[in-house]
Image (tube, helix red, strand yellow):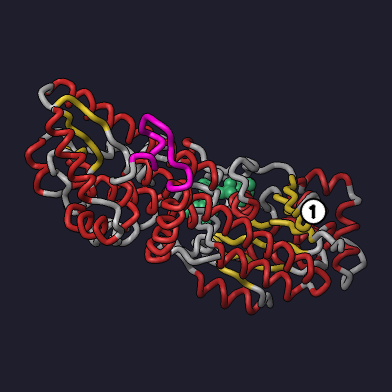
Amino acid sequence: MSVPALRIAVVGHTNTGKTSLVRTLSHQRRFGTVADQGGTTRQVSAVRLGVAGQTLVELYDSPGLESAPQLIETLDALPGQRHDGPARIDQFLSDAELVQRFDQEARVLELTQAVDVALYVIDVREPVLEKFLDELAILALAGRPLLAVMNFTASLESREPDWREALARVPLHTVLAFDAAVRDPQTERRLFEKLGSMLDRFTPTLERWLAQRQFEERERRDSALQAIADMLIDVAALRRQYALRSKSERVHQLNGIHHLVEKREQSCVETLLTLYRFGREDYRDAELPLVDGQWPEAPLDQHTLATYGIRTSSHLGAGAGIGAAIDIATGGLSLGTGTLVGGAIGAGTGIFRTAGERMLEKARGIGRLGVDDSALRLLGWRQLNLLTQLIQRGHGNPVPLEPAAESRWTRDRLPATLTQARLHPGWSALNDGTVDEAGRQSACKRLKSDLQQSLTGLGPSSP
Ligand SMILES: Nc1nc2c(ncn2[C@@H]2O[C@H](COP(=O)(O)OP(=O)(O)OP(=O)(O)O)[C@@H](O)[C@H]2O)c(=O)[nH]1
Ligand SMILES: [Mg+2]
């Protein structure tokens, strides 16, 4: 069944975050130009949002209002039509000279008359000045429903209560706090629900759009968790062999592991950025942990682990500079050892075989290298942290978010699947030989549900 598309104009004083709001609502980071100065947007432009080829919402960005006090006087001086707002606006728009003089305002008013509803964006760090109330009075003449969107509410300079009071006096009772830079699926939902309650005719449209957004959000999160699980399994099951008597071969293999893990982590980071439609250029050094789209510290480095407050196992001390790669064959399994033995016997998978295998390898003079628990913690924790931030961030300018709380990834026991992965080199796409696809898939699935729980623990609200 086809439903009517809802046309929404985003209007307001210049530099209040209108374009940022359009970016956030449309999830299109490249839409328009965002800059910290007035007069950035000069034209009206639209984004269409929809499902399966049907447009449900048309969002219109507009130039900022700058001359409302002068315009209101001009409108007041126009003859006739005193009580017919839309007619007065028409009168204004048909006067070429006035349109030229108030060109920004003319564009905004023409747009407002053409849409079903307008969002009036407010920078609540500003005091409630007369000029803003003039803007509201002018927009009201267009005869369209208005919803006030308070931006910058997260700022320390926010004057949200003053604005709420002033808006109630105008009177404009439909008000919503929506930080354009913090994309929270819940707030987005509230905005569309509010619009739905103001515009009965569009309730089915908005319901459909919200359902679509929820679906997209779930799919995106699912793919992100899948990517993290894939990466962790690849790394946990990674193995390299070397001739026990050859120190140089050991060092060579260790370096190889470092390099591989770093690359593997990076490819996971890129997947997450792509899923959330961010590019490297969205990350500014001082504001987010990523530098130029990458984690600044190598994952298998002891200093990195210390920086993240991750406990390293004692045997690592022996291999200063080696970082978090371990000698599996020489019994270097850290936290995992106890769990591994218990788990393996419990599962009947033959710790004996593994132990025998190890002894045999040792007898043959073969050493085996893998990745330590502490590095897996770091990898898991970093990606979950990044995902949390991506879920919460808008598509305006980057803002710093509090680092996610310490989680089980820095403290508790690792998910069992990761410990098991050590016994299954076939689960890693980083090893030579054929990948045990079925085993890998079911391990990833188990790990994904563990990751999902950790993510909930880190705090982003579910869509
Ligand atoms: N911290 C923070 N910054 C924001 C937010 N919204 C917008 N900004 C910043 O505010 C500045 C102005 O944002 P724009 O989206 O260009 O504002 P605009 O209203 O479209 O501006 P004009 O087109 O010039 O009228 C930019 O530097 C944005 O990054 C927000 O919610 N929080
Ligand atoms: Mg703009």
- Could you say which is closer to the camera, residue 128 or residue 37? 37
Q: Is residue 227 left or right of residue 85?
A: left
> Is residue 14 in view?
no
Q: Quadrant of residue 359?
A: top left
Q: Residues within 10 Å of mark 1 (few under 14, many from 20)?
A: some
Left or right: where 377 falls relative to 439: left
- Between residue 168 and residue 49, name the one nearer to us: 49
Image location of residue 224, percent across then percent down: 49, 50
Q: Position of residue 45 (x, y in %)?
A: 74, 45
Figure quadrant of the C terminus: bottom right
Which element type, helix, strand or loop, lies under badge 1?
strand
Give the amino acid type for the residue marked by disc 1 in the picture: Thr
> For this rendering, which residue is in front, 17 or 460?
460
Tell me if residue 217 comes above or below residue 261 in the rendering.
below
> Residue 179 in magenta?
no
Q: Which residue shows up at 33% across the image and 40% down it?
A: 425
Q: Of residues 45 and 100, which is closer to you in this image? A: 45
Percent position of residue 178, x then y: 56, 64
Give the main secondary structure of the magenta stretch: loop
Would residue 278 be seen by someone viewing this image from the given angle?
Answer: yes
Q: Which residue is at a point 68% across and 53% down the rendered structure image?
A: 65
Q: Which residues are magenta?
A: 425-439
> What is the quadrant of residue 244 in the picture?
top left
Residue at 26%, 31% (x, y): give it: 240
Residue 17 coordinates in the image, percent (x, y):
58, 53
Return the residue at label 1: 55
The stretch drawn in magenta includes residue 429: yes
Q: Residue furthest left?
A: 318
